[in-house]
């Protein structure tokens, strides 16, 4: 860590205290994510950090979201959690043709937190470092208009932007049908430039090969050119509740 980063971290901690909160028990790598997300501006990063702590306390007072609180979403069996890439990034896959807009938006938002927390926790090697990132794959194969949920997509990406800063390494959109292009353009209006730069729409063989190289054949499911089997999110065991609780640190 260079001198400028150390100074920014010190200023961030002081700014958080001025806002009536604390960075105690939060490591440098965690705090750096907030600084990077706010272009190394300590005051803006402090505001984001404090808002994040308040949000976490409200949406998951236990420190994590148990399966029982998102049972309807899990029952759809639409989210899969694979192993780690060579860079150590866990791979999250969503089969959009199994998704339908939720009538229970509270549960859906908790589900987004649940899947992101569990994905990040699956990369822990004993404990959280603070700078873990994930790779997302949205498979749009065989979707119909009934699967289109712009609100859900916006919620997911906005949660990543506001509450999981610098957690997204890359997101690949596969098998996008023509009718979805307009939907995606609308969704992009709500995404920050830095988020959009991490999203890649895969349309040709060269880009498919990029996904295989980035994720790895041993992790990527067979239907996407790899050798792995799909693993449902709820079938993946992390290091108990402790690992998911660590996502708040």
Image (tube, rainbow, N blue to C red):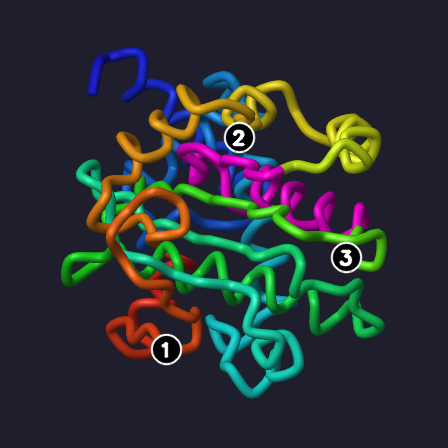
Q: Which residue is mark 1?
A: 235
Q: Nearer the viewer, mark 1 or mark 2?
A: 1
Image quarter where the C terminus lies is bottom left
| SS class, disc 2 | helix
Residue under circle 3? 147
Left or right: residue 79 compared with residue 89? right
Q: Is residue 37 above or below residue 25?
A: above
**241 or 80, which is in the foreground?**
80
Work out whether mark 3 precedes mark 2 in sequence or the reverse, and give the earlier one: 2
| Sequence order check, earlier mark of 1 and 3 | 3
Q: Nearer the viewer, mark 1 or mark 3?
A: 3
Quadrant, the N terminus? top left
Could you say which quadrant of the image residue 75 lies in?
Answer: bottom right
Q: Residues within 10 Å of mark 1 (few under 14, many from 20)?
A: few
Quickly name the residue at label 2: 45
Q: Is residue 153 magenta?
A: yes
Q: Nearer the viewer, mark 3 or mark 2?
A: 3
**Magenta stretch: includes residue 162:** yes
- The residue that appears at 64% across and 55% down in the rendered structure is 96
Residues at marks 1 and 3 touching, judged by CB atoms closer than 8 Å: no
C-alpha gap between disc 1 and disc 2: 36 Å
Residue at (57, 49) in percent of width and height: 52
**Judging from the image, what secondary structure is the residue with disc 3 in?**
helix
Q: Secondary structure at mark 1?
A: helix
């Amino acid at each position: 860590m260079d001198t400028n980063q150390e100074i920014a971290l010190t200023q961030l901690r002081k700014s958080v205290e001025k806002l009536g909160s604390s960075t105690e028990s939060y490591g440098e790598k965690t705090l750096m994510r907030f600084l990077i997300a706010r272009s190394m501006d300590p005051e803006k990063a402090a505001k984001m950090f404090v808002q994040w702590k308040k949000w976490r306390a409200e949406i998951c007072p236990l420190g994590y979201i148990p399966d029982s609180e998102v049972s309807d979403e899990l029952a759809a069996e639409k989210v899969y959690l694979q192993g780690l890439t060579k860079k150590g990034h866990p791979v999250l896959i969503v089969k959009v043709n199994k998704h339908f807009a939720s009538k229970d938006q509270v549960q859906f938002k908790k589900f987004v937190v649940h899947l992101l927390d569990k994905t990040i926790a699956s990369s822990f090697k004993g404990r959280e470092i603070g700078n873990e990132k994930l790779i997302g794959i949205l498979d749009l194969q065989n979707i119909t208009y009934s699967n289109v949920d712009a609100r859900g997509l916006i919620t997911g990406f906005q949660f990543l932007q506001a509450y999981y800063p610098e957690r997204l390494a890359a997101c690949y959109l596969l098998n996008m049908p023509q009718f979805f292009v307009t939907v995606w353009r609308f969704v992009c209006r709500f995404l920050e430039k830095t988020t959009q730069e991490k999203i890649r729409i895969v349309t040709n063989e060269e880009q498919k090969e990029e996904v295989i190289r980035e994720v790895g054949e041993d992790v990527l499911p067979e239907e996407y050119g790899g050798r792995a089997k799909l693993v449902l999110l709820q079938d993946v065991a992390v290091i108990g509740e402790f690992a998911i609780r660590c996502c708040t640190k």
